[in-house]
Amino acid sequence: MTRVNEHRLGVANGSHPLKVIEPVFTVLQIEQSNPIWMVANTMTVSLVTNCDFVAGSIITISGLTGSDTAATSVTVSSDFAGVGDWDQTDGNLTMVLASTMTVNHTYVVTFNLTNPRGGQESPAVSVGGTVEAGPIDAGVVTRGMTKVNEHRLGVANGSHPLKVI
């Protein structure tokens, strides 16, 4: 038999019979703009995938606890989603992709949360989801996000998400 050597979902030789990969984020970085309490705070997330995440796939950023953002939706600025469902209690932002995220391309997502009243350390933040793959979607392993280690307004590691003084 002759094998067809074509890409599928951005995976080299993805057309080979039983060629299987586990969809993951190869870059998963997060930072904030402002560590001061009770102000709007822009979160910036950078993501790279190891395969195409097609429209309809879901990305969930979890663990953003302690914010004072009570809304049930948050405006998202990105190449693939314009709004995210927000769960303040669990600190989860869930986005359904409106367009494809292409393999090995850096996508930047920004959204605003309101910092809490009073200080807190940065919570552990993770990202996971599902890739739309036909009748059965493929789960994306939830992994801890890398926090950018920079000063913000003179605060050491003030770039860590929801670290508030």
Image: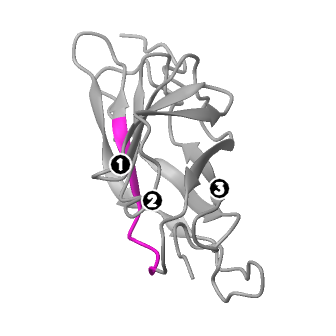
Magenta region, main secondary structure: loop
User: Disc 1 on helix, strand or loop?
Assistant: loop
Please, what is the three-letter code of the amino acid marked with disc 2?
Ser
User: Disc 3 on helix, strand or loop?
Assistant: strand
Q: Which residue is mark 1?
A: 88
- The residue at 68%/39% (across/down) is 105
Which badge, 2 or 3, is on the more N-terminal residue?
3
Q: Are marks 2 and 1 in contact (CB under 8 Å)?
A: yes
Q: Note whether residue 109 is visible.
A: yes
In the image, 75 versus 146, the foreground residue is 75
Which badge, 2 or 1, is on the more N-terminal residue?
2
The quadrant the N terminus occupies is: top left
CA distance separating discs 2 and 1 = 7 Å
Q: Quadrant of residue 134?
A: top left
Q: Which residue is mark 3?
A: 40
Mark seen at residue 67: 2
Q: Is residue 1 magenta?
A: no
CA distance separating discs 1 and 3 = 15 Å
